[in-house]
Image (spheres, rainbow, N blue to C red):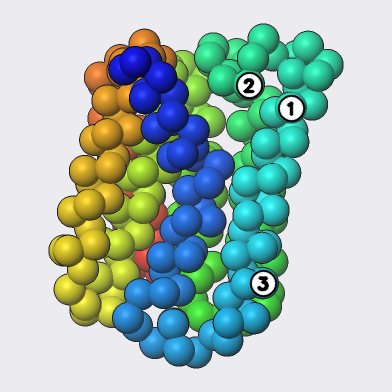
Amino acid sequence: METRIANFISIVFHPMLMPTLGVIILLNLDTYLSHTITPSGKFAVYSIVLINTGIVPALLVWLHLRFQLVKSLKLASRKERTLPFILTMFFYFFCYFILKRNHLPVPVYTLQLGASISVLLAILINFFWKISIHTVGMGGLAGMLLGISQKMNIEIISILLPFILMGGLVGFARLKLNAHTPLQVYSGFLLGLGSIWTVLAWY
């Protein structure tokens, strides 16, 4: 039963969904961003991010499985992760350039830049050590909220705490599935948090 719950949590909070969730949260916080972009504009941003950071990477992983380049969609080993991660990084940066070229508010495309940098760092680490991409994603959400709080001087502790708790829940799920060690889980969270917080707060 616990294993089924852990699998469910890993699917719901899959790292491919985190950039889209992040930009949805960003554009609906009580800041100028929620008022300067029209509903149709927001939908366009959501679509761009979802296609480039969710749908296309998922398709790439499926193609790797289809041509037997990986053993499963979980990409359990470091070697299996390398090429899908590199291709995914390309589309993350491509998404960043699309958002920037459309002259959107700075936090919108810098959020994607931070996510792209976190993927790049995860790839570099993956050459030597397996880090939890799930907690990189959850840490990225926490980093986004911290960065926006600092940049716009708003109080978001009531929003931040639930995401930290959810990050802990995702970390527990990855440990329960024996997908990672505690250090890999904690390191992933800190990597995601640090990457996106730094870019958003100091860009």
Q: Is residue 144 visible?
A: yes
The crowd level at tag 3 (other Cα within 10 Å; few <14, some 14-19, many 20+) is few
User: What is the secondary structure assignment of the residue under circle 2?
Assistant: loop
Residue identifier under label 1: 62
Residue 21 image position (x, y, % from top left): 47, 56
Residue identifier under label 2: 73
Measured in 3D between alpha carbons, the distance from the residue under mark 3 to the one under mark 1, in whole angstroms, is: 25 Å
Residue 151 image position (x, y, % from top left): 29, 75
Q: On screen, 60 above or below 140?
A: above
Instruction: Pick whichever, 33 or 147, lies toward us.
Output: 33
Residue 7 image position (x, y, % from top left): 44, 23
Side of 48 relative to 42 (left or right): right
Which residue type carries mark 2? Leu
Residue identifier under label 3: 44
Instruction: Pick whichever, 121 or 160, lies toward us.
Output: 160
The numbered mark, 3 or 1, whose residue comes first in the sequence reads 3
Which residue type carries mark 3? Ala
Instruction: Pick whichever, 167 or 114, lies toward us.
Output: 167
